[in-house]
Image (cartoon, rainbow, N blue to C red):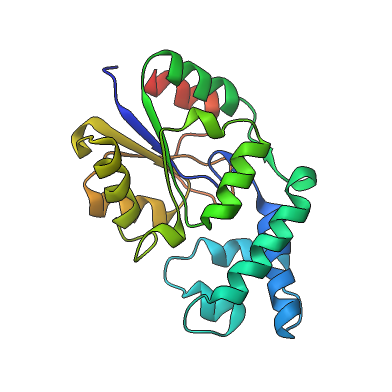
Amino acid sequence: MSKKLIIFDMDGTLVNSSLTIANAINYVRENLGFESMDPIEILRMVNDHTLNPAKTFYHAESFDADHERWFSEYYTKNHADELVLYEGIYELLDSLKNEGHALAVATNAYRGSTIESLTHLNVYNHFDAIACYDDVEKGKPYPDMLHKILDELDHSNEKSLFIGDGPRDEMASKNANIPYIMVDWGFTEHTNAVRTVDELKSIIL
């Protein structure tokens, strides 16, 4: 494989953060005076691109500073106990860097939470660029953060690859005209997807 820019989604692709995401959303809801939601239902709706997540979880038209502050507050207090890399991800990132590929993250998480998470998991320095929800006008499924990464690293879309685990990722990739690989070891289930990190490694290395 020729040298490429390989962009990863974070939650459900690199990081098993299902418990933290559900708990953080419920923490924000608690601060807003709402009842907790079933964590399984939260994770189902997080990846439903037809829903407005701010309205779905917080009964607001869009996320505001309090939502971000409370969500990040939960992350900061609990990421050390609740976040783990999926098995084989660290070795995959190491191999890709050693082969000379540029690496990036495109995530609908906030920048503060993203940096904390990747730093805690000892992979932050693997990435040449990170684009987050609060870095762009519109998050995935819009292509804004993918365009931001391409511009920042001066890479072309045809020499890039985006790897994600849900329809928002796939749509963003299509909208940015970047080749895409769907993986299925995270929050969602797909019929056509890469099932293991070893299988993904064999494809891209």
Q: Quadrant of the N terminus?
A: top left
Q: In which quarter of the image is residue 179?
A: top left
Q: Which residue is drawn at 23% across and 34% down?
A: 155
Residue at (73, 62) in percent of width and height: 23
Q: In this view, does 110 lie to the left or right of 36?
A: left
Residue located 56% across and 74% down the image: 65
Q: Viewed as shown, does residue 47 lie left or right of 192?
A: right
Residue 152, given in percent of the width and then of the height, sits at: 29, 41
- The residue closer to the viewer here, 62 or 17, is 62
Residue 45 pos. (x, y %)? 56, 67
**Residue 70, above or below 15:** below
Between 78 and 52, the one lying in front of the other is: 78
Q: How many marks?
A: 0
Q: Is residue 149 above or below residue 138?
A: above
Residue 137 vs 101, above or below: the answer is below
- Quarter the C terminus occupies: top left
Task: List x then y, in percent, for residue 97.
Answer: 44, 19
Any part of residue 63 in sight: yes
